[in-house]
Image: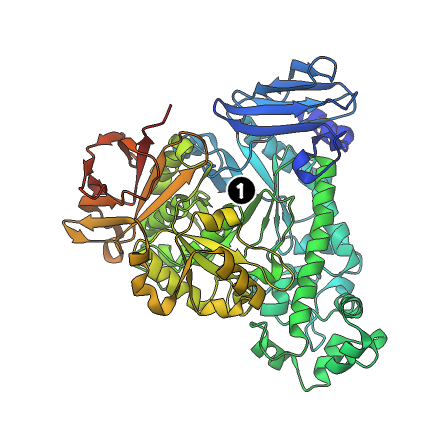
């Protein structure tokens, strides 16, 4: 190992310290705490600070190679108590850090809707950075075995250094399931901390296959174990040996998923924790009504078995929170409460290592049994199904629920499809269908990471995608970042989504009822945003500001999961309600929408028109046009010619001065704007392959 690597390692291990000064005011720290924050301004990324109540000198430094650092500014309350400075080139070859006499901290780009991220490390090299315009690496895995062996970590650190030198952000991953072998090295008696089913058997990560390490199998670690928190902190320590810019915890496989998909968690730590949960939540008289006579000796597993349940009966009912398992609702909420408490402690620990670093987690409102509510999270992450087996001739509908849910709570979502989805496309020679997956995701505000070196499993193992398949789409996002970042859905319809409905769903993509609503709204080209209502232990609800910009709320059978209080509040504060049974009346209730025609014929089900707006003064309006038609026999996206787009005159509040057409791989062009007597805008687009974007420049634009 060369001296530079050793020097950097010494810096990271020995000089990192708890820079609580970087905790922003948005987290509720005292007024005496200094604030440093990287923000997006009209001129680009800039550092803003306020050190009015702090004595320590902070040095802002920059580097081109992570080796030599140049001093840019000394920040003190006497000379620069509050200010801002452009971070020119951040993420594009220039590195910045804040330093005191005790340690230092990297400045990181925020996750944005225009972020172009490699899925994993093997994708990332100089050639691919150029081809895709990539800005970072999403799955920043550490070595799969023996993190305690320093040579393994040194090699990893050197690799991360190389990627950072390419100007790439590096999202370091903490693991629940993928790190199962780490736990065997970490804990001398791992058997004491594994999840057990109702029959007392260890629960295995079945989706990985039957794996073995040091004579032990890939069993599920319980998040109720006191060693679980220690294990996560150990991972954080190892992550920060390298120059990670963001942190993400692959947390969808906490015990919350085992509870509803893989046989439960009846380990001793889970049982003792649930006993205390019930003891704190209910009076003795209430417990007695549930059949719990002595709470101090209560064991939930024994309680269920005494009522005739086994692992088989549990698994037949566990997918639904109303699945007729005694006390199951409490058990589900208990598991979620504990994983949130544990992860809050982990996030605290991360901020102690690198305060202000962006933190994300693989968590989704479509799987609310394990949702993390922490305000410390700045983005969501995950793996999503794309209906590769059931939708072979177009763009999928089900993932739209995930995209809209993330935006409903103000989060950016980064994701990649599951390996089986790619295996299906490769096996059936439908690889170009993913162009529609990518276009739809980004047009709906999500970040679909780059498919390059893709794990598909089976005999093939890895599929190396040609860059030409998808690179134009990612270049398109990067080249038009200003039309992605800060934008949200512009809709007159709010689709009501009660979290409790997904608690009662079989899978992790929402309910069949919600899927039917998605199909109707998308195929009729009715723009909508999601109106989320929390469950028993969550107070999530739409803001009055959100409801005020809507003309209609759309409800389906899932609205039965709203509480009486939620239903009353919505009726009192929301606009007119249209039920799924009356969906044919929905369009007539709207003042305006967007309609698409191909060759003169209505084609709303062929091309989705997705209006988006920014709250930035004078920012243009945007309408994404996403193709929904694919020809599987020819592995070809079905291009559409002679496309007419009619935009209702009342959709946007300001007058439009001109419209620009942007398409992947094509030069932008100004379109001729026709105006109907009713004030609608009519635009002609010669051809659309996977995706096009209309930029509507406002008359009041500067």
Q: How many marks?
A: 1
Q: Nearer the viewer, residue 591 or 250?
A: 591
Residue 418 shows in the view: no
The residue most toward the front is 572
Give the class, few, some or many, for how many residues have Cα within 10 Å of label 1's Cα (few <14, many ≥20): many
Give me the residue at 14% from left, 50% from top.
600
198 to 427, vertically: above or below? below
Residue 559 x %, y %:
48, 67
Quarter that holds the C terminus: top left
286 to 647, vertically: above or below? below
90 to 683, vertically: above or below? above
Structure colour scheme: rainbow
Residue 271 sits in which quadrant? Answer: bottom right
Find disc 1 in the rendering and name its residue: 138
Residue 92 shows in the view: yes
Residue 645 sits in which quadrant? Answer: top left
Residue 203 x %, y %:
66, 68
Residue 395 x %, y %:
34, 54
Quarter that holds the N terminus: top right
Give me the residue at 34% from left, 49% from top.
436
Give me the residue at 68% from left, 15% from top.
80
Residue 248 x %, y %:
61, 45
| Secondary structure state at the residue bearing disc 1 | strand
625 to 388, vertically: above or below? above
Residue 257 sits in which quadrant? Answer: bottom right
In the figure, is residue 325 to the left or right of 395? right
């Amino acid at each position: 190992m060369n001296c530079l690597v050793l020097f950097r390692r010494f810096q990271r291990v020995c000089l990192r310290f708890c820079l609580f000064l970087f905790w922003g005011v948005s987290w509720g720290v005292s007024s005496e705490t200094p604030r440093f924050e990287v923000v997006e301004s009209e001129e680009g990324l800039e550092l803003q600070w306020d050190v009015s109540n702090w004595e320590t000198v902070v040095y802002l430094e920059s580097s081109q190679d992570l080796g030599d650092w140049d001093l840019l500014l000394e920040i003190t309350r006497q000379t620069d108590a509050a200010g801002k400075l452009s971070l020119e080139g951040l993420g594009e070859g220039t590195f910045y850090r804040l330093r005191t006499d005790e340690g230092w901290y990297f400045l990181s780009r925020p996750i944005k809707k225009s972020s172009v991220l490699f899925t994993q490390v093997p994708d990332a090299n100089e050639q691919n950075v150029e081809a895709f315009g990539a800005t970072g690496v999403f799955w920043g895995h550490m070595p799969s075995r023996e993190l305690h062996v320093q040579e393994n970590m040194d090699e990893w650190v050197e690799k991360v250094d190389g990627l950072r030198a390419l100007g790439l952000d590096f999202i370091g991953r903490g693991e629940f399931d993928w790190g199962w072998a780490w736990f065997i090295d970490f804990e001398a008696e791992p058997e004491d901390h594994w999840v057990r089913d109702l029959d007392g058997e260890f629960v295995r990560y079945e989706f990985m296959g039957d794996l073995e390490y040091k004579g032990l199998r890939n069993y599920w670690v319980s998040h109720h174990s006191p060693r679980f928190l220690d294990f996560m902190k150990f991972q954080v320590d190892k992550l920060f040996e390298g120059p990670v810019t963001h942190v993400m915890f692959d947390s969808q496989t906490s015990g919350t998923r085992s509870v509803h998909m893989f046989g439960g968690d009846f380990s001793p730590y889970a049982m003792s924790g649930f006993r205390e949960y019930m003891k704190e939540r209910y009076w003795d008289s209430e417990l007695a009504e549930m059949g719990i006579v002595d709470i101090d000796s209560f064991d939930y597993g024994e309680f269920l078995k005494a009522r005739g349940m086994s692992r088989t009966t549990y698994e037949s009912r566990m997918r639904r929170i109303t699945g007729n398992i005694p006390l199951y609702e409490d058990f589900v909420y208990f598991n979620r409460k504990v994983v949130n408490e544990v992860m809050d402690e982990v996030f605290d620990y991360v901020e102690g290592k690198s305060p202000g670093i962006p933190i994300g987690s693989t968590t989704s409102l479509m799987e609310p049994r394990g949702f993390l509510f922490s305000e410390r999270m700045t983005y969501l992450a995950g793996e999503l199904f794309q209906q590769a087996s059931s939708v072979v001739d177009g763009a999928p509908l089900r993932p739209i629920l995930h995209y809209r849910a993330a935006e409903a709570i103000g989060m950016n979502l980064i994701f990649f499809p599951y390996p089986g989805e790619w295996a299906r496309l490769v096996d059936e020679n439908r690889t170009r269908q993913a162009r529609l997956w990518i276009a739809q995701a980004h047009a709906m505000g999500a970040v679909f990471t780059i498919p390059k070196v893709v794990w598909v499993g089976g005999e093939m193992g890895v599929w190396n995608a040609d860059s030409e398949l998808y690179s134009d789409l990612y270049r398109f996002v990067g080249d038009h970042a200003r039309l992605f970042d800060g934008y949200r859905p512009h809709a007159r319809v709010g689709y009501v989504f009660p979290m409790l409905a997904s608690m009662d769903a079989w899978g992790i993509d929402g309910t069949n009822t919600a899927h039917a609503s998605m199909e109707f709204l998308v195929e009729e080209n009715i723009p909508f945003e999601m109106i989320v209502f929390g469950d028993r232990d969550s107070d999530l609800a739409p803001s009055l500001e959100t409801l005020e910009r809507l003309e209609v709320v759309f409800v389906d059978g899932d609205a039965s999961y709203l509480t009486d209080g939620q239903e009353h509040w919505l009726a009192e504060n929301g606009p007119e309600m249209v039920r799924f049974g009356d969906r044919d009346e929905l369009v007539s209730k709207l003042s305006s929408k967007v309609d698409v025609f191909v060759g003169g014929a209505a084609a709303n089900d062929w091309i989705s028109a997705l209006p988006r707006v920014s709250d930035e003064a004078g920012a243009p309006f945007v309408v994404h046009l996403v193709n929904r038609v694919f020809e599987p026999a020819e592995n070809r996206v079905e291009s559409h010619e002679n496309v007419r787009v009619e935009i209702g005159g009342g959709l946007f509040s300001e007058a439009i001065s001109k419209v620009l057409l942007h398409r992947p791989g094509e030069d932008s062009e100004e379109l001729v704007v026709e105006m109907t007597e009713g004030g609608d805008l009519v635009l002609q687009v010669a051809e659309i392959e996977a995706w096009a974007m209309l930029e509507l420049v406002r008359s009041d634009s500067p």
